[in-house]
Image: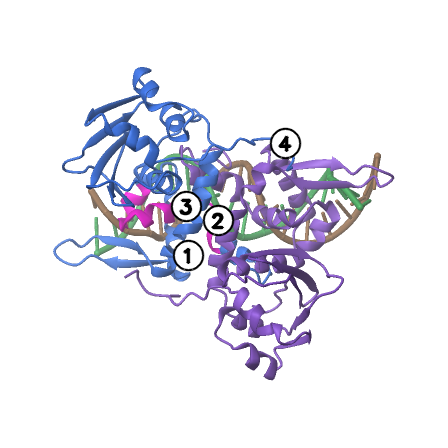
Chain colours: A purple, B blue, C brown, D green
Amino acid sequence: MRTREYGQFCGLARAAELLGQRWTMLILRDLLVGPRRYSDLAAGLPGIPTNVLAARLKELEQDGLVVRQARGGGDRAIVYQVTGRAEELVPALDALASWGAAGMRVPREGEVVTEAALVTALRVAAAGGRPPGVRRAVTYVVRAGEAVAHAIVSGTRVTAGPGEHPAPDLTIVARSGPGFREMLAGTLGADEAVAEGVIEVSGDKALLAEFAATFRVPYSPSLTGPAA
Amino acid sequence: MRTREYGQFCGLARAAELLGQRWTMLILRDLLVGPRRYSDLAAGLPGIPTNVLAARLKELEQDGLVVRQARGGGDRAIVYQVTGRAEELVPALDALASWGAAGMRVPREGEVVTEAALVTALRVAAAGGRPPGVRRAVTYVVRAGEAVAHAIVSGTRVTAGPGEHPAPDLTIVARSGPGFREMLAGTLGADEAVAEGVIEVSGDKALLAEFAATFRVPYSPSLTGPAA
DNA sequence: CGGGATCCCCCGAGATACTG
DNA sequence: CAGTATCTCGGGGGATCCCG
């Protein structure tokens, strides 16, 4: 059983061979937000050893999940970009992220929220909430720690992306702690969240209830005990 | 960043901390089929070192995904069983298994099909095929290598389980090689599969087309190249 | 005989330094 | 900026041993 293989003709085993190594899924999470340079990845994955990042990118390239491209034009930086095969991973990684988020309660000491994590959280939360069906497009900007992401709700579609939006209808700043996560779980009402200072909103504050209904992260009731 | 942690308040990072270690997802795959004893797990995971299996079970117990129970009655064997929290993993593991299966072409040298892998494959394939909507319940038995599993199709519901079924309507024996997988992908017609000897059927052979429509495993068209 | 524990070896991850 | 080189060390692989 050399190195990564499991010796089973099984989809889950093959997936585990490709994704089960340390840092690999988080690298893909970041690249699925958009093409990134080596230093972008290193900055978005605090604590990753540089040799491990280099090794993982090489493996992902050999596995056909990432391509390495010299960006055209005067800019001669190298960018890493996901392949179509890696994009097919989105449903699976989102399901894993949703499951993991359902078990999250409070941030551990020193844990940070990165931009890719915030974008992924918005995308996953959009799938767990009530389909919006708004008449006109609504844009949100969310800030948590150093991270900034935006979401555009148009019809029943929600798209999440990194960074600011030029003219958000509502901006939400999440204070550190479990408050924002509880609001997304529905265990803390949006109004109480504002009243208790766990979030600060600016813009069209009437949209906050709409936001809380559109974006929902599951909250596992069963964190212990045997299955029924 | 000791050992398993990633230092990010992110659902995917938390999931990776719990599941990202070697063998962990395959252990859960086996336990999600049903409670298993230590020796059952060891037999179903050929190549796993015994100390790693013991360590993983201990971690899974501490993480609240597995409980260790002394089976009642005269039998004093210990069984491991998943918790409700682990059962919530089924959609995510199935999505991963589906993605991994979409990239599988031919078995590698020495790869085996275990019982848990076959049951999982049937469950995943049932979600990828056409909803059956049969009038009466239909039962299938599938054999691949040493593994045996069965599926019961009733209305629009499909349940997959390990081992034989007392009175299957159709029994399918898959010869080793990529043939059965190609039939499930739809790239090899059921009739050709029989004609070429990649499967052998017994029972109500008219049900084979029904089987091939009900169970479908995706076949990724993009095994290389950058995303569109 | 089921359910592990123990031992040794070595690969791979973590940390740091350095270079094209 | 984008990695490579080098070192250490913990954890996985493999075999064997042990205990109720």
Mark 3 element type: helix
Q: Nearer the viewer, residue B42 or C7?
A: B42
What is the quadrant of residue A10 in the picture?
A: top left
Asked if marks 2 and 4 touch (Cβ < 8 Å), the reply is no
The kind of secondary structure element at disc 2 is loop
Write down the chain letter for disc 4: B
Chain-order first, disc 1 or disc 4: 1
Q: Residue furthest top?
A: B196
Quadrant occupied by the N terminus of chain B: bottom right
Q: Position of residue A68 (x, y in %)?
A: 70, 36
Q: Secondary structure at mark 4?
A: loop
Mark 1: amino acid: Glu
Which of pointers 1 and 2 lies earlier in the amino acid sequence? 2
Q: Are marks 1 and 3 on the same chain?
A: yes
Q: Amino acid at mark 4?
A: Gly
If the image is split into quadrants, where does the C terminus of chain B sit? top right
Residue carrying label 1:
B59
State whether residue A136 is above or below residue D18.
Answer: below
User: Which mark, residue B21?
Assistant: 2
Left of A206 or right of it: where is A79? Answer: right
Residue assigned mark 4: B225
Please state which amino acid type lies under the numbered disc 2. Gln
Q: Would you say the residues marked 1 and 4 are in contact, meaning their CB atoms lie under 8 Å apart?
A: no
Q: Are marks 1 and 2 in contact (CB under 8 Å)?
A: yes
Total numbered labels placed on residues in the image = 4
Q: Are marks 2 and 3 in contact (CB under 8 Å)?
A: no
Q: In the orientation shown, which residue stands out farthest toward the bottom?
A: A195
